[in-house]
Amino acid sequence: MSKKSISYNEAVSQIEDILNRIENEELDVDELTKLVKEASGLIKYCKNRLYETESEIEKILSNLDNETGE
């Protein structure tokens, strides 16, 4: 699964599904390890998207301030 091909909301939904499985199912160590690794990658993807979005918004607001002379 390529995390770049999913949306932020899809990644969050997948994280929630993984957490539900971890909390509600008896998992063997191998399955637990696999799910934790998958969740970790999804969390990293979400953090990066949030950072990128914040940077983009700051640039837009900065450009607006420059255009209006503030």
Image (cartoon, rainbow, N blue to C red):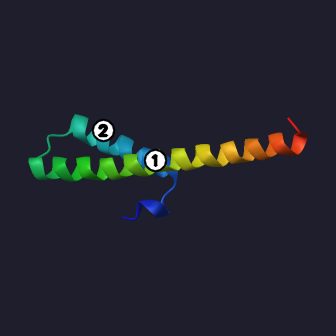
Q: Secondary structure at mark 1?
A: helix
First of labels 1, 2 by sequence position = 2
Residue located at (21% from left, 53% from top): 34
Look at the picture and state if 11 lies above or below 22: below
Q: Position of residue 65 (x, y in %)?
A: 81, 40
Q: Nearer the viewer, residue 26 or 30?
A: 30
Q: Position of residue 58 (x, y in %)?
A: 67, 42
Q: Name the side, left or right, on which 31 lies relative to 55.
A: left
Q: Circles 1 and 2: CB distance less than 8 Å?
A: no
The N terminus: image quadrant: bottom left
The residue carrying pointer 2 sits among few (fewer than 14), some (14 to 19) or many (20 or more) residues within 10 Å by Cα, namely few
The residues tagged by marks 1 and 2 sit, at their Cα atoms, a distance apart of: 18 Å
Q: Nearer the viewer, residue 46 or 10?
A: 46
State which mark lies toward you, 1 or 2.
1
**Mark 1: amino acid:** Cys
**Mark 2: amino acid:** Asn
Q: Nearer the viewer, residue 58 or 27?
A: 58
Look at the picture and state if 22 lies above or below 38: above
Q: Position of residue 41 (x, y in %)?
A: 34, 52
Q: Position of residue 30 (x, y in %)?
A: 12, 52
Residue located at (75% from left, 43% from top): 62
Q: Name the side, left or right, on which 67 lies relative to 3.
A: right
Look at the picture and state if 5 lies above or below 36: below
Q: Name the side, left or right, on which 3 lies relative to 23.
A: right
Residue located at (44% from left, 44% from top): 12
Q: Residue furthest left?
A: 29
The residue carrying pointer 1 sits among few (fewer than 14), some (14 to 19) or many (20 or more) residues within 10 Å by Cα, namely many
Instruction: Tell me, for residue 61, which label it has, or none.
Output: none
> Which residue carries the number 1 mark?
46
Residue located at (37% from left, 41% from top): 16
> Which residue carries the number 2 mark?
20
